Image (cartoon, rainbow, N blue to C red):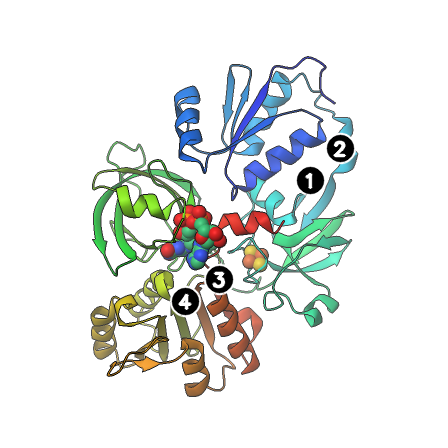
């Protein structure tokens, strides 16, 4: 319980940050009144930077004292600054959740999902969309009860629910519980998550609304000599100057000097409008990562299907190039869906790759065909359904806008793909995710 006279509390947050969610839930439980300021607004970002010198959420101000870093690293200092007892009475409101693979029991604050609490506790729980759309956090509820927030039925079907499966990103425990994420027998990359100061070293127009951007670690960063370990297909959380933090898939492979990103301008988008209009060579960019479980499974020997929509080509490019670099010999079918000719990009590059590697096929499909178009036409997912029928023993990687990802999931699972063999990156906006909570 709070001391009656603690100084004013302000927290700077972003909508996607699990540490922010955990911090807010903890303050509410402790009955600490606070003012929340959203770093997604560039003006608030500038204010936070000038008041605290920090621009990574969450930042907490208790009077003039500044706390930042993960929720758990802030908590001891906040407990002291707010005059709270370490033995808080509100503890009864929390639930203990044992996470089998991590071999740990975490404390989940009231109203917080299992995934949020696990990530805030430093556990690499498999996840992608954090919005109940991809199925990456699908888990078995071994014991206990949870409230399941809304989610897509492709991420978790009614049948799976009846079998005791849950989505950790939509599950709020109502009792103590034990959970185990699925796919524990697979290769799981456990790369340390890092925050790196980078600089923009290249910007080019891939299409009229997709920019191809390269970043390298700033030489002034103390970790500049130490390359970022990640697995092809993972994503990073990027903070461009004056823009809110957003997730972007890495199109480059591990070990390359530069990080490559494909960023599509979303009309009215808080981050992408700024990136497209104002980003310059040499600009600083904060990169945090790696994240995500839609990465190349290098031990898989069966055929591979990749379906990309728009800038969803980014992680697919990373996956395909890494598979080739690792000399994976199985058939690899890549379908790239776009609206029209002018929305296709990297076609020469991908066709050249397919010519040099006979196990690779590359099929662009445009939905808005004009007369004389040289590409296959229709929805990319219909082209897949027409040409490939039996996905038993395959792995499928899908990336792009939610409707395309859901259609691809539906088609592949209806044709025998096992749900654990489908790995999806849903390009979902944090604005939408918080509106659905
Ligand atoms: C795991 C992951 C990886 C991602 N990788 C990439 C990537 O490689 N390249 C890339 O371009 N994007 C990628 N995204 C999407 C990206 O993180 C942002 O959501 C996107 O750039 C929009 O940000 P914004 O701030 O400009 O728009 P916001 O201000 O967040 O949104 C503005 C409006 O646009 C809508 N909107 C947001 N995104 C889209 C969209 N994709 N299509 C249609 N409407 C949308 C929102 O609902 C909102 O109404 C990824 C997302 C995730 C979760
Ligand atoms: S992270 Fe939970 S459904 Fe995607």
Secondary structure beneath dot 1 equals strand
Mark 4 = which residue?
298
Mark 2 = which residue?
91
Q: Residues within 10 Å of mark 3 (few under 14, many from 20)?
A: few
Task: Specify whether tag 4 is near ligand 1 (CB below 8 Å).
Answer: no
The span from disc 2 to disc 1 (Cα, nearest Å) is 9 Å
Q: How crowded is mark 2: few (under 14 residues within 10 Å), some or many (20 or more)?
A: some
Who comes first in sequence, dot 4 or dot 2? 2
The span from disc 2 to disc 3 (Cα, nearest Å) is 36 Å
The residue nearer to you, when weighing 372 against 434, is 372
Task: Specify whether tag 1 is near ligand 2 (CB below 8 Å).
Answer: no
In the displayed structure, does residue 429 sit left or right of residue 7? left
Who comes first in sequence, dot 2 or dot 3? 2
Mark 3 = which residue?
187
Residue at the location (73% across, 64% down)?
A: 164
Quadrant assignment for the N terminus: top right
On screen, 314 above or below 32?
below
Secondary structure beneath dot 4 equals loop
The span from disc 3 to disc 4 (Cα, nearest Å) is 8 Å
Mark 1 = which residue?
107
Q: Do the numbered discs 3 and 4 sit on residues whose CB atoms are within 8 Å?
A: yes
Q: Do the numbered discs 4 and 2 sit on residues whose CB atoms are within 8 Å?
A: no
Question: Residue 352 falls in which quadrant of the image?
Answer: bottom left
Number of marks drawn: 4
Who comes first in sequence, dot 1 or dot 3? 1
The span from disc 1 to disc 3 (Cα, nearest Å) is 27 Å
Q: Residues within 10 Å of mark 4 (few under 14, many from 20)?
A: some
Who comes first in sequence, dot 2 or dot 1? 2
């Amino acid at each position: 319980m709070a001391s009656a006279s603690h100084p004013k509390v302000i927290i700077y947050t972003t909508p996607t940050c699990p540490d922010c969610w955990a911090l807010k839930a903890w303050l509410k439980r402790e009955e600490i009144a606070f003012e929340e300021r959203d770093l997604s607004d560039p003006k608030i970002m500038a204010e936070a930077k000038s008041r605290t010198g920090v621009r990574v959420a969450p930042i907490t101000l208790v009077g003039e004292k500044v706390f930042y870093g993960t929720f758990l690293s802030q908590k001891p200092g906040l407990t002291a600054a707010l005059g709270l007892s370490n033995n808080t009475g509100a503890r009864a409101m929390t639930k203990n959740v044992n996470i089998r693979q991590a071999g740990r029991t975490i404390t989940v604050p009231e109203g917080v999902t299992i995934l949020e609490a696990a990530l805030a506790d430093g556990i690499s729980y498999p996840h992608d969309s954090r919005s109940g759309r991809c199925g990456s956090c699908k888990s078995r509820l071994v014991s206990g009860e949870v409230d399941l927030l809304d989610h897509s039925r492709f991420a978790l079907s009614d049948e799976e629910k009846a079998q005791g499966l849950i989505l950790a990103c939509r599950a709020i425990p109502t009792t103590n519980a034990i959970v185990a994420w699925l796919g524990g027998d697979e290769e799981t990359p456990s790369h340390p998550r890092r925050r790196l100061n980078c600089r923009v070293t290249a910007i080019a127009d891939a299409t009229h609304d997709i920019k191809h951007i390269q970043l390298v670690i700033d030489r002034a960063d103390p970790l500049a000599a130490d390359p970022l370990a990640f697995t092809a297909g993972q994503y990073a959380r990027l903070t461009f100057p004056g823009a809110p933090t957003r997730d972007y898939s890495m199109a480059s492979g591990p070990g390359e000097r530069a990080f490559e990103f494909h960023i599509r301008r979303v009309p009215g988008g808080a981050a992408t409008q700024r990136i497209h209009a104002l980003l310059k060579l040499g600009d600083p960019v904060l990169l945090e990562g790696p994240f995500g479980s839609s990465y190349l499974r290098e031990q898989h020997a069966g055929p591979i299907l990749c379906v990309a929509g728009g800038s969803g080509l980014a992680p697919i490019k990373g996956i395909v190039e890494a598979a080739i670099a690792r000399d994976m010999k199985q058939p690899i079918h890549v379908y790239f869906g776009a609206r029209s000719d002018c929305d296709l990009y990297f076609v020469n590059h991908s066709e050249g790759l397919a010519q040099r590697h006979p196990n690779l096929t590359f099929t662009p499909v445009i939905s808005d065909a004009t007369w004389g178009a040289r590409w296959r036409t229709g929805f990319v997912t219909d082209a897949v359904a027409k040409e490939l029928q039996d996905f038993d023993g395959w792995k499928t990687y899908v990336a792009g806008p939610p409707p395309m990802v859901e259609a691809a999931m539906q088609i592949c699972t209806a044709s025998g793909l096992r749900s654990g063999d489908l790995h999806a990156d849903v390009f979902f906006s944090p604005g939408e995710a918080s509106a659905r909570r």
